[in-house]
Image: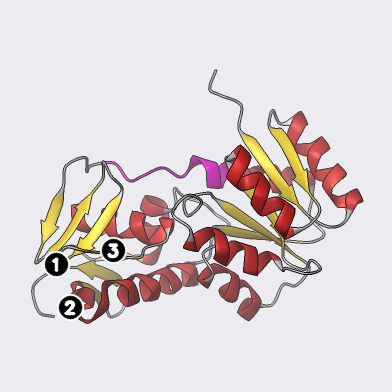
Amino acid sequence: MGQVKQILIVDDETAIREMIVVALEMAGFECIEADNALTAHALIIDAKPDMVLLDWMMPKMSGIELARRLRSDELTADIPIIMLTARDDEDHKIHGLEAGIDDYITKPFSPRELVARLKSVLRRVTPKGIDQVVEVAGLRLDPVSHRATSEGAALDLGPTEYRLLQFFMSHQDRAYSRTQLLDMVWGGNVYVEERTVDVHIRRLRKALGERHQYLIQTVRGTGYRFSTQAQ
């Protein structure tokens, strides 16, 4: 048996937290709770949970602000975040994904759906096939230290962008469809839409900057390719 995963539930509504705790404990998870983002941040630093379930709308500091704060701090940048939201419009979701959340679930949701999403996000692992340092045209990725550098300068990558870059650098000069990238990088999470790939490709290109963004090439009608060869 693996270690019991600890989930932090952040929601200002007690009834919703209680419902989630019951569902997750029945599924074998350990739960800790916070009713606001500031308490949650202190708990995350102290307890280092395996995942954060985060309500979007909260008083004082919103879930999205907390997500950005977690992603900007090296200590908390890799903690998976699922956002709980009462809104289902696409712009809202894209906004959340761009802030670095791993998935979202729209209220009201069933406990079974929540557990399925949560397990799916936790299953995502670093793509196989790379355990050595890889360097391409001054872009260097070290899987042991979990760092990527451009001409020696550290790149500011979120966890999904890092996994995407790691996959691309170990699978060069081949075009992959969005569906294939979802399977390889997101671990076949059926809940993540293909457009999510485009969001993270955009973020990865931005992080790579002018020096290296040319390596991530759009293949018209197919998807994306990582190559040092001109298109």
Q: Circle 3 is placed at which residue position?
A: 176
Tell me if I can see residue 149 in this picture. yes
Q: For mark 2, give the secondary structure.
A: helix
Q: Are marks 2 and 1 in contact (CB under 8 Å)?
A: yes
- Kindly identify the amino acid type of the residue bearing the numbered disc 3: Tyr
Q: For mark 3, give the secondary structure.
A: strand
**Nearest to N terminus: mark 3 or mark 2:** 3
Q: Which residue is drawn at 8% across and 73% down?
A: 229
Q: Label 2, label 1: how many angstroms apart (C-alpha)?
A: 9 Å
Would you say 127 lies left or right of 125 here? left
| Residue 2 location (% of width, % of height) | 53, 22
In magenta, the rendered stretch is 119-128
Tell me if I can see residue 171 in this picture. no
Front of the two marks 3 and 1: 1
| Residue 95 location (% of width, % of height) | 58, 76
- Kindly identify the amino acid type of the residue bearing the numbered disc 1: Glu
Q: Circle 2 is placed at which residue position?
A: 211
Q: Circle 1 is placed at which residue position?
A: 151
Depicted 5 relative to depicted 3: above or below: below
**Nearest to N terminus: mark 2 or mark 1:** 1
Q: Residue at x 69, y 64 (%)?
A: 63
Q: In which quarter of the image is residue 152?
A: bottom left
Q: Label 3, label 1: how many angstroms apart (C-alpha)?
A: 27 Å
**Nearest to N terminus: mark 3 or mark 1:** 1
Q: Which residue lies furthest to the right in this view?
A: 15
Q: How crowded is mark 3: few (under 14 residues within 10 Å), some or many (20 or more)?
A: some
Q: Do the residues labelled 3 and 2 touch (CB within 8 Å)?
A: no
Q: Which residue is drawn at 56% across and 63% down?
A: 69
